[in-house]
Image (spheres, grey):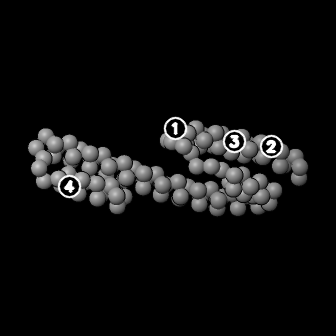
């Protein structure tokens, strides 16, 4: 976020010999930087909060085999290459989690 604020305030004024049109372009460029940094910071904070909440809920399951499998899987995870890759991975993970949850509700009572 700090870099976005810096872009917003200082980017338009880095040169003194600009025409009004160039100044307008620089203001737009600085504004885009601010929006990009704000969105990135917000999504990063949201990801951290939801990740911690998911970990807390996982521990409430008291299923040690699941927790060990989850820890192993998380250790192998790679960072997404871009927003589309991250969205696809997130949706895949969500689908797998819902599937495991539903099958767990059916299978666990049968196991005892």
Left or right of 32 on screen, residue 65? right
Which label sits on residue 25?
none
Image quadrant of residue 3? bottom left
Residue at disc 3, secondary structure: helix
Image quadrant of residue 55? bottom right
Whichever of labels 2 and 1 marks the residue nearer the N terminus, that label is 1
Quarter placement of the N terminus: bottom left
Whichever of labels 4 and 1 marks the residue nearer the N terminus, that label is 4
Marks 1 and 3 sit apart, C-alpha to C-alpha, by 18 Å
Whichever of labels 2 and 4 marks the residue nearer the N terminus, that label is 4
**Mark in the foreground, 2 or 3:** 3
Q: Residues within 10 Å of mark 1 (few under 14, many from 20)?
A: few
**Mark in the foreground, 3 or 4:** 4
Marks 3 and 4 sit apart, C-alpha to C-alpha, by 50 Å
Residue at disc 1, secondary structure: helix
**Camera-side residue of 31 and 65:** 31
Instruction: Name the residue rendered at 39%, 50% in the picture.
Output: 39
Residue 98 in sight in this render: no
Marks 2 and 3 sit apart, C-alpha to C-alpha, by 15 Å
Q: Which residue is mark 1?
A: 84
Q: Which residue is mark 4?
A: 14
Q: Which residue is mark 2?
A: 106
Q: Is residue 108 above or below residue 1?
A: above
Q: Residues within 10 Å of mark 3 (few under 14, many from 20)?
A: few
* Percent x, y of residue 105: 77, 46
Whichever of labels 2 and 3 marks the residue nearer the N terminus, that label is 3
Residue at disc 4, secondary structure: loop
Q: Which residue is mark 3?
A: 96
Marks 2 and 1 sit apart, C-alpha to C-alpha, by 33 Å
């Amino acid at each position: 976020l700090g870099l976005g604020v810096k872009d917003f305030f200082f980017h338009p004024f880095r040169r003194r010999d600009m025409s009004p049109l160039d100044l307008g372009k620089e203001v737009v460029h600085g504004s885009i930087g601010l929006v990009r940094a704000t969105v990135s910071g917000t999504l990063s904070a949201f990801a951290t909060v939801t990740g911690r909440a998911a970990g807390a809920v996982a521990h409430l399951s008291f299923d040690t085999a699941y927790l060990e499998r989850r820890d192993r899987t998380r250790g192998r995870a790679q960072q997404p290459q871009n927003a589309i890759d991250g969205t696809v991975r997130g949706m895949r993970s969500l689908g797998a989690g819902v599937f495991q949850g539903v099958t767990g509700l059916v299978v666990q009572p049968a196991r005892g």
